[in-house]
Amino acid sequence: MDPEQRPFDGLKVIDCASYIAAPAAATVLSDFGADVVKVESLEGDAYRELFRPGGFGPDDRNYGWELDSRNKRSLAVDLKRPEGLEILCRLIAGADVFITNLAAAARERLRIDYASIGPLNPRLVYAAFSAYGETGPDAGKTGFDATAYWARSGLMDITKADHSAPPARSTAGMGDHPSAMTLFAAIVTALYRRERTGRGGLVTSSLLDNGLWANSCFLQARLFGAPVPPRPPREQVSNPLSNVYRTRDERWLVLVMLNEARQFAPLLEVLGCAHFLDDPRFATPAARRMHNRELIVILDTGFAQRDVAEWRALLDAAGITFSVVSSLDEVLQDEQARGALVPFAQGPGLTVSSPFAVDGVSKVAPRMAPALGEHTAAVLREAGYAEDQITDLHALGVVVSAAATT
């Protein structure tokens, strides 16, 4: 494929959604060439203000908005007005994908549900995202990734530091961005079906469904009737070789040693504990689990003898599977991670690239997120509105442009 040709060049996407998963799915489409029109209210997408209580960056930029609205064009329109709905309907008639996370009741009230707008374009892929799904007793309930993905799915409980600890708190967008990839996959699957049949259709996903999928290893165990014991404190974990350990300089390492036959001896050697290789308490995986607390004390003592930089070199040389528990600032300096941090095409700074690549395809150089209504007039012209009609729509307060908001 020509590097300048991208899989979604010419694909027209309408992003009629707000924070975070559904708009992020549109962002991934845009990374591979799709033309995404961001439909906002006249007041602007609430995501524009989401992080203000926590503070913006030093230049007052909304970092979340810049991440998930890059490459998009902003159309500010009042969908509650008949003229505003007519604008959206014109866009839908020529669109390939429509994405929304408005609640089902709101979609019906605005007459932008699939039953209302699907007939306008039989080739349209209509992607509906919600907190709890389209059916069931809580289908209309509001939710965010912290409540629907993290708490309701059981992940919040099962990832506690131990069974007596408070629930683990999620971080911003932690469930939303993985869920965005699921919605992206649903859209692409529907587009593939359209290539074969000529028909679009409705695709759905939810935060709860994605949280259940993320927690599916333990859920599958329970579905088979297998017990999932409460998480013990780190000093009592059943497998000391999959645990976290603190270094002399108060940093943490996480070990995940699934190949104990190959890695246990090298681990004890780099820790200076090779004499324990002949200890019957640690001779086999079963014995190590029986004497788990004793082995954890030995490993704790060993790791406390050196700083994290020394351990990084020693463990790498010994072929031990581990990671330093990195801070955000360390991630930004991580040579391996920096390949996923790409510069904006215009303006300073980097952004996080979508998490996959297609051989022979270069992604769109990220464009800065749009100002409210920055592309209103251009989108209206493309939809067939004449200049006097655009002027009238502004005068009636049906749409706004960036110039009108300054």
Image (cartoon, grey):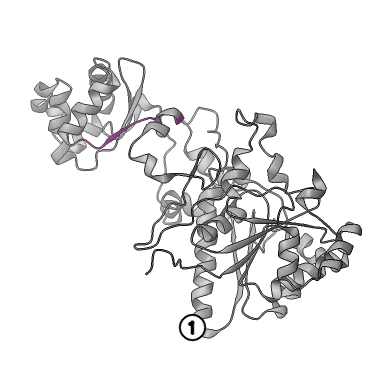
Residue that mark 1 sits on: 196
Above or below, 383 relative to 129: below
Asked if residue 323 lies in the magenta stretch, the reply is yes
Residue 51 quadrant: top right
Residue at image coords 89%, 63% = 392
Residue under the point 56% across and 84% down: 198
Report helix, strand or loop for mark 1: helix
Q: Position of residue 259 (x, y in %)?
A: 20, 43
Residue furthest bottom as drawn: 197
Amino acid type, residue under disc 1 in the picture: Arg
Please say if 208 is above or below 349. below
Compare residues 278 and 51 and report the one nearer the observer.
51
Q: Position of residue 25 (x, y in %)?
A: 56, 57
Name the spot of residue 56 as percent of width and height, x first.
63, 31
Percent of width and height locating residue 36? 61, 61
Note whether residue 283 is visible.
yes
Q: Quadrant of the C terminus?
A: top right
Packing grade of label 1 (10 A; few <14, some 14-19, many >=20) is few
Residue beneath the point at 53% across and 79% down: 194
Please state, as top left, top right, bottom left or bottom right, where the N terminus lies in the image: bottom left
Would you place residue 320 above or below residue 362 in this image? above
Magenta region: 320-328
Looking at the image, how many numbered discs can be counted on the residues?
Answer: 1
The residue lying toward the viewer, choosing from 213 and 295, is 213
Displayed quadrant of residue 67: top right
Apparent side of residue 126 relative to residue 245 in the rendered image (left or right): right
